[in-house]
Image (cartoon, rainbow, N blue to C red):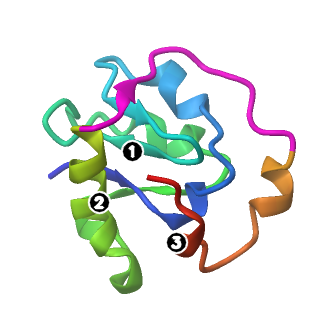
Amino acid sequence: MTYVVAESCIRCKYTDCVDVCPVDCFREGENFLVIDPEECIDCTLCVAECPANAIYAEDDLPEDQRHYTELNAELAKKWKPIIAKKTAPDDADDWLKVKEKFHLLIR
């Protein structure tokens, strides 16, 4: 099992999770983070650090978010690692409670 970044991260892209990851398994896109399933060691440290509550154990993903497992794996192969926390986008808090953001994902 791996951990997966789901929809609520889109446009928020807080990077608190990156700071606690012992294996640097996060990858960064323009407005979203993903977890590389090949690197993730299932330590769970990132889950509690995510202000957007966007990180789930693969088996615990809500039904409507299941496609994020494949999406994380796909994008992890294309995007570069992020190994240190960065400042969140200025409007991250505005996007925090917005639902259905998949169409806003920049690949």
The residue under the point 76% across, 69% down is 97
Assign the magenta stretch its main secondary structure: loop
Q: Residue 39's image quarter?
A: top left
Q: Residue at x 52, y 72 (%)?
A: 102
In front of the other: 106 or 101: 106
Counting from the top left corner in percent of width and height, residue 36 is at: 25, 38
Residue at horizontal 38%, vertical 32%?
A: 26
- On screen, residue 94 above or below 46: below
**Looking at the picture, which amino acid does disc 1 mark?**
Val
- The question of residue 81 being in magenta is answered with yes
Q: Nearer the viewer, residue 76 or 50?
A: 76
Q: Position of residue 24 (x, y in %)?
A: 34, 20
Residue that numbered label 1 is attached to: 34
Vertical placement of 12 versus 26: above or below?
A: below
Which residue is depicted at the point 19% across and 42% down?
A: 37
Q: Residue furthest bottom?
A: 63
Residue type at mark 2?
A: Leu
- Amino acid type, residue under disc 3 in the picture: Phe
Image marks 1 and 2: residues in contact by CB distance under 8 Å: yes
In the picture, the disc for residue 24 is none
Reading the image, the residue beneath label 2 is: 71
Residue on which the image places disc 3: 102
Q: CA distance from mark 1 to mark 2?
A: 8 Å
Tag 3 near tag 2, CB within 8 Å: no
Crowd rating for badge 3 (residues with CA inside 10 Å; few <14, some 14–19, many 20+): some
Q: Which residues lie in the magenta part?
A: 78-90
| Mark sitting earlier along the chain (1/2) | 1
Residue 100 % position (x, y)? 60, 80
Q: Earlier in the sequence, mark 1 or mark 3?
A: 1
Camera-nearest label, 1 or 3: 3
Compute the Cα span from label 1 to label 3.
Answer: 13 Å
